[in-house]
Image (spheres, helix red, strand yellow):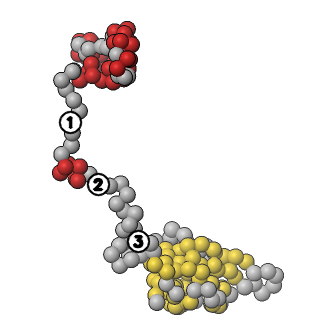
Amino acid sequence: MNNRLGLIIFLIAICLSWPVMAQEPAIDQDQAVAESDSEADDGTDFLGTIIQQQLGEDETTPELSDDAQESFIDPDFLKDDVKAYDDYPVVTVRILDKITADTRTYDLEIGKTVAYGALRIRPMACKKSPPIEEPESASFLQIWEKMHRGADQWVYSGWMFASSPSLAAMEHPVYDVWVIDCKD
């Protein structure tokens, strides 16, 4: 029943819009081609002829005033003002030992490996947004676990963000590590 009702409404809408569609002027292609052939000698192209027929002979495209042209925004206006993240030599991280519930905050120098329990943490970069932008600190950390027997295991290698630590969290059964800030 609903499908029939929808079909009836659709057909009524088409019937009501039919006279409106029939009133639109159509371009006679043969006439346009004939006119374009006759005007081909003076350099007028086919598309220009059709546009002139649609606009009329006395109508022209409007010219923009100087004020209107100045109000347009240059699409490359941000290229000069774009600020990149600033590099910092120290990253502040917080480490949680889930077994003992011990939480510690450390300032780690970029490029130096630090041991915390079985973990080895090496920050490779720390970047912070400029003060005029939304605050964000991110650090590229390499974290591996020192095993008693056998080879060491990679635990984490990637960027961690201070504003959303769960975005790229380290998955470890004993330790949690997250970035707090970048410092000088």
58 shown above or below 16: below
> In this rendering, does residue 7 appear at all?
no
Whether residues under marks 3 and 2 lie with C-beta atoms below 8 angstroms apart, the answer is: no
- In this view, the residue farthest toward the front is 41
Whether residues under marks 1 and 2 lie with C-beta atoms below 8 angstroms apart, the answer is: no
Q: Is tag 3's residue or tag 2's residue first in the polypeptide sequence?
A: 2
Q: CA distance from mark 3 to mark 2?
A: 20 Å
Q: Nearer the viewer, mark 1 or mark 3?
A: 1
Q: CA distance from mark 1 to mark 3?
A: 39 Å
Q: Please tell me whether mark 1 sits on a helix, a strand or a loop.
A: loop
The residue wearing badge 1 is: 62
The residue wearing badge 3 is: 83
> For mark 3, does the 10 Å Cα neighbourhood hold few (<14), some (14 to 19), or many (20 or more) residues?
few
Q: Amino acid at mark 2?
A: Ile
Q: Nearer the viewer, mark 1 or mark 2?
A: 1
Q: Is tag 1's residue or tag 3's residue first in the polypeptide sequence?
A: 1
Q: Amino acid at mark 3?
A: Lys
Q: Please tell me whether mark 2 sits on a helix, a strand or a loop.
A: loop
Q: Nearer the viewer, mark 3 or mark 2?
A: 2
The residue wearing badge 2 is: 73
Q: Which mark is residue 74?
A: none
Query: Seen in the image, is 79 located left or right of residue 97?
Result: left
Location of residue 25 by image quarter: top left
Q: Amino acid at mark 1?
A: Pro
142 shown above or below 89: above
User: What x and y, as percent, mark residue 12?
Assistant: 27, 15
Q: Name the residue: 32% across, 55% down.
A: 74
Q: Quick one: 126 or 115, which is closer to the camera?
A: 126
Q: Quick one: 175 or 107, which is closer to the camera?
A: 107
Q: CA distance from mark 1 to mark 2?
A: 20 Å
Q: Quadrant of the N terminus?
A: top left
